[in-house]
């Protein structure tokens, strides 16, 4: 696991009315602070990424569909510099993924339905000077192939 990345399996509590899934609480040991919450939707087969932040920590949960979320450690002083992690997250594997600054991340909806990501960030988005840095997903700058792996 990339240094500083954390996961938490989430519990789905179903009943005859539907279900509840708690993602993150202020008294959770993983919680740092609140910046904002947003939803990002990816259509099947679409890659959204790579991007990273210099200050912000992300808290990803896929609340509908399934997504492949991939992380790459860009921190030269990290014991896991250059390492990749893959996570298959969503309705079939409900989890919270904590992504620290300078860890590049991307996601791809897998299956036939869009994937819905809820991200709770530690910082609000700064429109005039965003803490968001992009790397083209298929450039090869990060050694990862987004194609499906059959076999």
Image: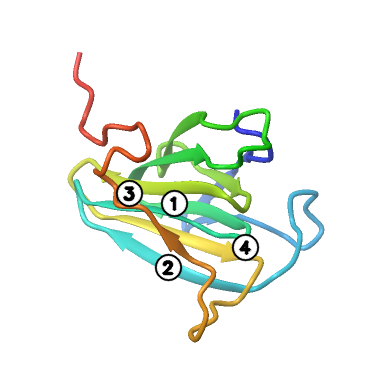
Badge 2: residue crowd in 10 Å (few <14, some 14–19, many ≥20): few
Mark 2 lies on residue: 39
Q: Secondary structure at mark 3?
A: loop
Q: Decide which of tag 1 and tag 2 comes sooner along the chain.
A: 2
Question: Foreground mark, 2 or 3?
Answer: 2
Instruction: Tell me: 12 left or right of 30.
Output: left
Residue topped by disc 3:
65
Q: Return the residue nearer the eye: 10 or 110.
A: 110
Look at 20% across and 33% down and name the residue there. 147
At 40% from the left and 37% from the top, the residue drawn is 92
Say what secondary structure mark 1 lies in: strand
Q: Which residue is mark 1?
A: 62
- Comparing labels 4 and 2, the label whose residue is closer to the camera: 4
- The answer to whether residue 3 is left or right of residue 131 is right
How far separated are the C-alphas under marks 4 and 3? 25 Å
Q: CA distance from mark 4 to mark 2?
A: 16 Å
Which element is circle 4 on?
loop
Percent of width and height locating residue 22: 62, 55
Q: Which residue is mark 4?
A: 56
Q: Residue at x 48, y 31 (%)?
A: 85
């Amino acid at each position: 696991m990339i240094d500083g990345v954390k996961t938490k399996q989430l519990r789905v509590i179903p009943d005859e009315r539907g279900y509840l899934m708690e993602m993150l609480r202020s008294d959770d040991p993983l919680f740092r602070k609140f910046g904002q919450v947003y939803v990002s939707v990816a259509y099947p087969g679409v890659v959204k990424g790579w991007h990273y932040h210099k200050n912000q920590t992300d808290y990803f949960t896929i609340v509908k569909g399934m997504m492949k979320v991939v992380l790459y450690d860009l921190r030269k002083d990290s014991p896991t510099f250059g390492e990749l992690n893959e996570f298959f997250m969503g309705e079939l594997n409900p989890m919270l993924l904590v992504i620290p600054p300078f860890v590049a991340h991307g996601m791809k909806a897998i299956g036939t339905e869009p994937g819905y990501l809820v991200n709770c960030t530690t910082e609000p988005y700064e429109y005039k000077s965003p803490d968001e840095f992009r790397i083209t997903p298929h450039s090869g700058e990060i050694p990862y192939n987004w194609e499906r792996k059959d076999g």
